[in-house]
Amino acid sequence: MKQLYLKTFFILLTKTTYVLSETIVVMLGTGTPVPDPARAGSSVAVIYNQQAYVFDAGPGMVRNAITASQQKGISALYPTRIEYLFLTHLHSDHILGIPALAATYWWRRSKQLKLYGPTGCQSMINGYYCFLQQDISLRTKGSQPVSNPTMYQLEVEEHDDDQWEFRHGQVSIRPFLVAHGDIEPAFGYRITTPDRVIVISGDTAYFDGMAEHAKGADILIHEVICEAALNRQPQRWQQYFNKTHTSSSQLAKLAKAVNPGLLALTHILHYDEPIKTVLDEVKSGYSGRIVLAEDLDCY
């Protein structure tokens, strides 16, 4: 698997023609709750056989999805073509893009958006319906053509554990529980396609079981917090971060145990430290292939 990965690995900087049978990973948002004009909220898309599977929908991810579809030629990421959305947890920087994704051209959707995630998803979506009530009324009761007036709705499947699996054709998506402080459940995901294994950590502190979940990954997309910045935080914040996020040295330890084909750093908490400090910190303990993920990077 890794030989195939190394052969087909690429980062797309301009519009490219794709081999549609190959798996493409697109970083639709690499940010954190800390505002950053260059980074949308957390979101990753895995595309296989012209079908997109999106993980988290932070603020700004829809704009990046449109950019990927129109400027990089990844048509599966046009908002009305996105059919499957998976959530790691319900923090705002992972979900604020959901209303934008669900509402964008909803009256031109041919298939409803399907949402999979932790308990609480349905309540959140019910709130979205209330928010969109006036838009729905204006469009359906006016003169605007609306072929299917229910396409603003989402099909929601929520879970309070990781004992479930999603299968679609040759794609398998399995959740696993991660350690994100008090949030239970919080998920990571292992995505298997015919040519790649991709593991997405979600937000998580370091825990021993992560190495097993990430074993054999061609691409490990993992969150990280800068150790130099962490050490300067007030004690109460250090205590919180140690229970909720993975430090640079801990991620290096994990990567060394897993040895993925590619380690992509995302959701990078670095505060007043240059973001490259995080990359240097991880590299000091791990010599494998690492990238500092940027919005719209493709692997």
Image (cartoon, rainbow, N blue to C red):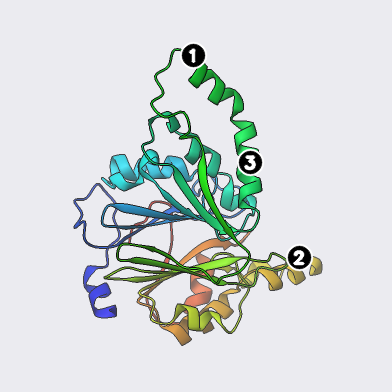
Q: Residues within 10 Å of mark 3 (few under 14, many from 20)?
A: few
Q: Amino acid at mark 3?
A: Asn
- Res 148 quadrant in image: top left
| Residue at image coords 65%, 68% | 180
Q: Position of residue 151 (x, y in %)?
A: 45, 35
Q: Amino acid at mark 2?
A: Trp
44 or 256, nearer to the observer: 44
Q: Which residue is mark 1?
A: 142
Task: Kindly state the secondary structure of the residue where label 3 is placed.
Answer: helix
* Vertical comparison of 37 with 284: above or below: above
Q: Which residue is mark 3?
A: 126
Q: Residues within 10 Å of mark 2 (few under 14, many from 20)?
A: few
Task: Kindly state the secondary structure of the residue where label 1 is placed.
Answer: loop
Please name which of the two marks, 2 or 1, marks the residue nearer to the observer. Answer: 1
Q: Amino acid at mark 1?
A: Gly
Q: Which residue is mark 2?
A: 237
Q: Position of residue 50 (x, y in %)?
A: 27, 52
* Vertical comparison of 72 with 234: above or below: above
Looking at the image, residue 177 sits to the left or right of residue 244; the answer is left
Please name which of the two marks, 2 or 3, marks the residue nearer to the observer. Answer: 3
Quick one: which residue is furthest to the bottom in this view?
Answer: 257
Q: Cα distance, mark 2 to mark 3?
A: 33 Å
| Residue at image coords 24%, 47% | 15
Q: Position of residue 161 (x, y in %)?
A: 61, 69
* Vertical comparison of 43 with 150: above or below: below
Q: Can I make out residue 285 in this image? A: no
Q: Cα distance, mark 1 to mark 3?
A: 24 Å
Q: Earlier in the sequence, mark 2 or mark 3?
A: 3
